Each structure stands twice: as C-alpha cells, then as structure tokens.
Image (cartoon, grey):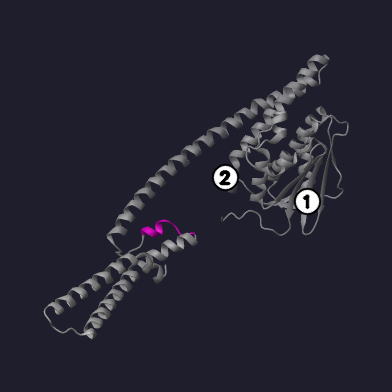
Amino acid sequence: MRFRDYLKDRLFYIIIYFLSNFLAIIIMMLDLIIRKERFHTANIIYAFVLSTIFLTVFLSIDFGRKRKFYNLISNKLDNDVELTDVFNIPDKISREYDLFKEVLISNYLKYISTLEKHKKSSETQNYFNNRWIHQMKTPVSVIKLILEDERDRDIDEYTRKNYESIGEEVEKLSHGLEMALYTLRVSNFELDFKVEDVSLFEILRSIINENKNAFIANSIYPKIISKEDKIVKSDKKWIKFVISQILSNSIKYSKVKDSNNKVIDIEVYDENNKTVLLIEDRGVGIPKQDLDRVFDPFFTGKNGRKYLESTGMGLYLVKDVCDKLGHGVSIESIEGEGTKSSIIFYHGKSIYDLTQ
C-alpha cells in the first residue's frame, strides 16, 4: 500500500483536523480583536506550520506501523500467500486489527473444521462406492462367462437372440461400472499414476478385443490403417481408458446409423513434434451447435437426448484425464457424416507435475 492511498483513506480526518485548527485560529484572532490587541500573522503561520508538521509525523509513524499489514494483504491479492500469514503479524497495530484478527481466526477455524468434515464424508463415500463397484463387477463378469458358454451350445435362434440382448445390456452395465470407477479415481489421479513407454498398437488391439462382441453384434469393422506402431510416454491404464471411451462413443453412434459401411478407421502418425492417434467413424455425427460443449460435464446434446444412451460424462473424463496427462484431445464432426477424434501426444512435454 502506498502512502498516497493511506492518506486518501484518512482524508476525512485530515480535513477535520485542519478545520479545527482554522476555527481555533479564528477564535483567537477574534478574541484579540475584541480586546483591541495586536496579532501577528507570522505567529499564526508558525502555529499552522508546526501543527502540520506534528500531523505529518503522526501519520508517517502510523503508516509505518500498519504498512506490514497492508503489504501482506496486497501480496495475498497478487500472490499465493497463506491466510495464516495474516495471523502471524507480531506488531500491535490497533484494537480494530486485534478484533479483525480474532474474527478471522474464528471463522477460519470453523471453515477448516467444516472442510475436514466434508473431506472425511467424501472419502468415506468414495470408499464405499469403490467397494460397491468392485463387488458389482464380479457378478457382471460371471454373467458374461455364462453367456459366452451358452452361445457355444446348440440352442434355438430365439434363445440365442435373447442371450445376445442380455449380453448387450451386460456390456452397458460393465461400461457404466468402469466409468463410475474411473470417475472416483480421477479425483486422486496423482496417487494412481505411472509414466512409461506405451505401445499404441498394443493398447488398441487390447481395446478392440475387449469390445469384439459389440463390434460383431453391430456389424462394425474397426480398421487400423497405419502400418507402423508408435511408442508414446503416458500412463498405460489411463490412456487405455481414454481411448476406450472414444471407441465406445464411435460404436454407440455408428450402430444407430442405417448404413452398410460401418467402419471405424484408426490411424497413428507423427506430425510437427507430436504423435496423433486419430479415430474416425462414419456414424451419425455431432450437430454443429453441440461441438463446443462436448467436453462439458453432463452435457448429452441432441444425440444423447435422441438415443438415450449418453451420461454426458465420458468425454468430460476424457478431457480431464488428457489434461492431467499433458495430452491434447480434439473432436471434429459433421452431422450425418461422422466424427474424427484425435488424441495428441506432445514430444518432450512433461507429464503431470506431481508437485502441483
């Protein structure tokens, strides 16, 4: 805080001070005139100047005492200064400051107490949600195994179609549980994170194999058109989740399109100091007015409302995870023609600063 700003805050008191001095001088002059005594202008000026000097000294001393407090508050606005630093000012500034400090400490302690309660409640809820999801994944896996076993048997067409319908719903349930699990994990990303060399072809083949029933059931053909694998720096588990979400969307919005050309092209290439993974489908596409909001949480858009299969969280998590990994993600789409989704791996860029 500058001295000029300090004076502005006390301008009213300064004006009152000079008015009081002026009135005192006027009263003394009138008294001398009434008593027909001579008054000297030099004495009046001397008294006024001396009074002004005393006022200036007082204001300077008072500003010096309070400057540390003002500077700390100003720095807190400009920089990341801890609130507790305000409590640790040793100088005895004023009773007003002491009262302000007591109120601030009291509210701060209440805030910390409330925050801790919410944190414990959130951690407990996340723990039970995590346990519940893992418990639910077991029966889902058992149902999958039973369905696969039943498909291999000699059964009639009606029963086979029923099994296929059940299988599709089980896949949706499995996908939903997986998304819920990663939604819980992403809040503690730094505790579940490991950077390593990742083969994109290996990840892609694994995801395609895991979703082979969905590809076959919906007559969708995934095609890796690149000939050369690319190795990138990332977290294997998290980048697999990201790619899986994008491929899941491609399947979801390709199967609803009435077309005999249901192909998902997957391309991996280097470009301008970065590696790009491009996934292109020929599905229903995304309306132009929805493109700017596809990464917003809970945004389902026109397609989500029409086909009733969107949670609005998939692409939000994709963007959130990519940001944490230091990767880029972008989506281009033309309604009725298809969608291009790109994951960008920047060469030499540091991956997730764990110190933040």
Q: Is residue 132 left or right of residue 311?
A: left
User: In the displayed image of the protein, which residue is found farthest to the left?
Assistant: 35
Determine whether 147 is above or below 203 in the image.
above
Q: Secondary structure at mark 1?
A: strand
* Tag 1: amino acid: Val
* Residue shown at the point (64%, 28%) measured from the top left: 138
Checking the image for residue 308, the label placed there is none
Question: What percent of the width, then of the height, locates residue 182?
Answer: 63, 39
Question: What percent of the width, then of the height, locates residue 168?
Answer: 74, 25
* Whether residue 292 is visible: yes
Q: State the extent of the magenta-drawn residues as a range.
A: 80-87
Residue 46 lies in the magenta-colored region: no
Residue sitting nearer the eye, 260 or 240: 260
Question: What percent of the width, then of the height, locates residue 326?
Answer: 67, 53
* Tag 2: amino acid: Asn
Checking the image for residue 276, the label placed there is 1
Q: Is residue 61 left or right of residue 31?
A: right
Q: List the residue tagged with mark 2.
A: 188
Tell me the quarter of the picture where residue 42 sits: bottom left
* Residue shown at the point (71%, 34%) measured from the top left: 302
Crowd band around label 2 with a 10 angstrom C-alpha radius: few (<14), some (14–19), many (20+): few
